[in-house]
Image (tube, rainbow, N blue to C red):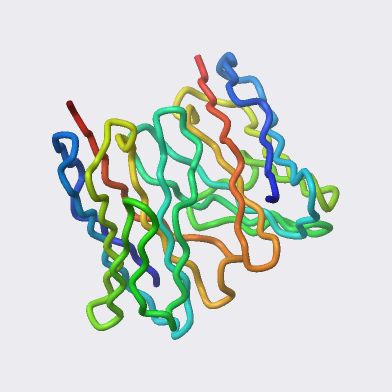
Amino acid sequence: AQKVTQAQTEISVVEKEDVTLDCVYETRDTTYYLFWYKQPPSGELVFLIRRNSFDEQNEISGRYSWNFQKSTSSFNFTITASQVVDSAVYFCALSGPRGTASKLTFGTGTRLQVTL
Amino acid sequence: GAVVSQHPSRVICKSGTSVKIECRSLDFQATTMFWYRQFPKQSLMLMATSNEGSKATYEQGVEKDKFLINHASLTLSTLTVTSAHPEDSSFYICSAPQGAELFFGEGSRLTVL
């Protein structure tokens, strides 16, 4: 069975601080995809990144960066110089062997609060 | 990019009534769609996989007679919550794949009084 663990339930930081959201996953599939989504208070899911299990390169997109370590089954997400607009719930998710076009297993989410 | 639209975005109904939520792929065809449920401050849990032209596949613990899913066309899947009760109040969100991409609807917030 697949499982995604986001141990941090809630994180509170002051604006401009860096913050890392942890994600650990379990799967028996050899091919899979990992995702991060942002869910603002309005509820819609905002896609942030998809990472193929074969691609362990870290990725940076603006203030966002992701550290994928297959050896520890982790896919952590760092926001640099956090802003109030980053306040949201962030979900890590895992898909099965069919790739992205399949159902996702979500973690329990990490609520990030960025204050002035 | 591809868009998935849900309607209604919010619905309030009385206990015992049925509510239909639509999920449409606006500019692509989707033979499969996924329905998730999210209770307040909780994660998204997959309820069922909607298959065009055939029966939906429900996850363990989801009552198929209560949550009716119809995928009548390649661009529309509907979720009907039958005889809704306050415990069915939740955020329902659908997703549809297009190629290697997965697109989510905006979600539908159901409140049962």
Residue B25 against residue A56 in the figure, above or below: above
Where, quadrant-wise, is the C terminus of chain A in this rendering?
top left
Please give the name of the residue rendered at 22% of the width and 34% of the height, measured from the top-left corner. A113
Please give the name of the residue rendered at 79% of the width and 59% of the height, measured from the top-left corner. B54
Q: Nearer the viewer, residue A24 or B1?
A: B1
Horizontal placement of B64 versus B90: left or right? Answer: right
Quarter of the view holding residue A76 = bottom left
- Which residue appears farthest toward the front when viewing the image? A62
Q: Position of residue A68 (x, y in %)?
A: 31, 72
Q: Position of residue B96 (x, y in %)?
A: 66, 54
Q: Nearer the viewer, residue A111 or B36?
A: A111
Horizontal placement of B97 versus A48: left or right? Answer: right
Where, quadrant-wise, is the N terminus of chain A in this rendering?
bottom left
Quarter of the view holding residue B67 = top right
Residue B113 against residue B62 in the figure, above or below: above
Please give the name of the residue rendered at 50% of the width and 14% of the height, measured from the top-left corner. B113
Please give the name of the residue rendered at 27% of the width and 70% of the height, measured from the top-left corner. A74
Residue B78 against residue A53 in the figure, above or below: above
Q: Position of residue B99 (x, y in %)?
A: 69, 67
